[in-house]
Amino acid sequence: MAPSGLAILIGAGPTTGAGIARILASPTHGNLAVALLSRTGDADLATKISKTSGGGVLKAFKTDTSEPQLKQAFEDIKSWAQSVDNDLKLKMSIFNIKHSHKTPFEEETAQRYTESMTTYATGAVIFSQLSLKWMLSQYPEHASLPSGAKVMQKAGTIIFTGTLGSLRTNPGFAAYGGGRAAVRMLAQSLAREYSARGVHVVHAIANGGITDNFHEYHADSGEIAKEGGGDDAEAVLQGKKMRAESVGKLYLSMMESECDLWVHELDMRPAAEKF
């Protein structure tokens, strides 16, 4: 089955990123061609996800969050997407970077603080701008209603995976909290500026642990089908951890939501997580 669209995921690691990508690429779920962006450009991870997704179409691209590398990565993705299908449209971009920075404040330096903010917050600006320009270029004309008014065409979905640090932070995490809060405000600004132009912008707060080790629980036998991570599987069944695949399903539902009802901010947590 040919992919129905394209998704770009930056921060494509072996846990959260892999689980999200598996759902997006799965022919029985998202059926999207998925570009996996990471600092390593792990082709083996793309191959593994393809196998576990039932034959999904994925390709790994090596990049960091700097402007030159991201621009080149997007050009490479466009070439790859055309080779998959000449009319493949970008439907979703996910900023899933897990950049962290902890330093006692009296030992913090302006240079390290700036570097941390640039890597995370400025990287989000560059990534979302490249995604927006691509999405908006795909639908130059919109259908008209009998009244002459234009029908809202969904141009794409941009999701930022954030953490509780975007709302409140802890000692030693001044730069981390600053970057997370900045990206939350970026998402809000983009939503207010581009929703009316058809771009759905979502900020998702992940409040709790995420695992990609748990796969299936058979209630009749009480057995857990999994690839390692027995403790994580137990934690999922107890409502103490989230499955990365569950996050992927939630993100997919955001992409599929029609223009009459959009969610901007999500608070994702397992049932037993305190808040």
Image: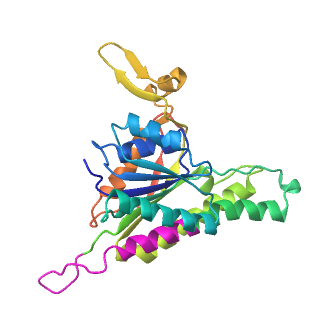
Q: In this view, does 137 lie above or below 60?
A: below
Q: Position of residue 185 (x, y in %)?
A: 56, 67
Q: Where is residue 14 in the image (x, y as percent from the top left)?
A: 54, 39
Pick out the residue farthest to the top: 221
**Residue at horizontal 46%, vertical 31%?**
239
Q: In this view, does 37 lie above or below 158?
A: above
Q: Please tell me whether residue 17 belongs to the stretch shown in magenta.
A: no
- Direction from residue 199 to residue 124 in the image, left or right: right
In the image shown, does 126 or 50 lie closer to the viewer? Answer: 50
Q: Please tell me whether residue 130 belongs to the stretch shown in magenta.
A: yes
Q: Give the range drawn in magenta.
A: 126-151
**Residue at horizontal 30%, vertical 44%?**
29
- Scheme by which the image is coloured: rainbow
Q: Where is residue 116 in the image (x, y as percent from the top left)?
A: 72, 59
Q: Quarter holding the C terminus?
A: top right
- Direction from residue 49 to residue 118 in the image, left or right: right
Pick out the residue farthest to the bottom: 148
- Direction from residue 172 to residue 94 in the image, left or right: left
In the image shown, does 11 or 178 lie closer to the viewer? Answer: 11
- Direction from residue 71 to residue 143 in the image, left or right: left
Q: Is residue 9 above or below residue 125?
A: above
Q: Position of residue 262 (x, y in %)?
A: 34, 62
Q: Is residue 16 something one can see in this rendering?
A: no
